[in-house]
Image (cartoon, helix red, strand yellow):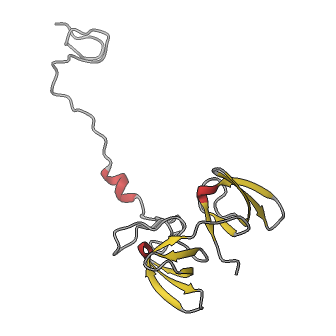
Amino acid sequence: KQENQFGDSSGNAGSGWGDSSDHGGSTWTPNTGEAESMVKHDPDGYGNDAGGMDTAMEGSGEEAAVWFMERVCVQLKKNTAQAVIKEINGSMAVVEMEDKSTLTVRNGEVSMVPPQEHDMVLVTGGADVGVEGELVCIDGTDAILKESNENFKIVDFIHLAKISAT
């Protein structure tokens, strides 16, 4: 065999790739260890490691739903009493009952009260996250909101949470 311009005597003159029987070379494998260790754990995107609505809830084995936040109207699963979330602390929430008493519950012990027309609602998903308004009309899977600035928005009904007006 003659050595080609690349110093290769494999017979693949001019290809520069070498012989397939050449097992002396190394195989490339991606190194992800260093990159992964450099990624900071920041579940809510605001530098908070706990208390964010996307944080996995410790203790309960469940993740909090996107609607599990302050001012959202909820219903206790054990007796269907309605309440409003006043404070979130990890997987727990302090809720205010209709009689103004408070109760501490786990995220799995409450469900969201489905919004109805004329309720104040908060958009919890989709392109309009964070928008608040009055639910004017429900049309199948769509909902029409009237914002405080008198503008109207069409959003997916599934992304709405009934909130306390106060």
Q: Which residue is drawn at 27% across and 8% down?
A: 13
From this view, report whether residue 135 is shown above or below residue 163: above
In this orientation, which residue lies closer to the viewer: 60 or 45?
60
Residue 91 position by quadrant: bottom left
- In the rendered image, residue 49, in percent from the top left (x then y), is placed at 45, 71
Question: Dividing the image into 4 quarters, which one contains the C terminus?
Answer: bottom right
Residue at the extreme right? 150
- Which quarter of the rendering shows the N terminus? top left
Report the number of discs: 0
The image quarter containing residue 152 is bottom right
**Measured along the vertical axis of the image, is residue 69 above or below residue 101?**
above
Q: Please state if 116 lies on the left or on the right of 31 as rendered.
A: right
Residue 38 lies left or right of residue 44; in this view the side is left
| Percent x, y of residue 113 | 57, 70
Lateral position of residue 98 relative to residue 52, left or right: right
Residue 16 in picture, x, y percent from top left = 30, 16
Q: Position of residue 96 (x, y in %)?
A: 56, 86
Comparing 120 with 56, the one in front is: 120
Residue 155: image quadrant is: bottom right
With 76 as the anchor, is 10 left or right in this view?
left
Q: Which residue is drawn at 15% across and 27% down?
A: 24
Residue under the point 25% across and 10% down = 12
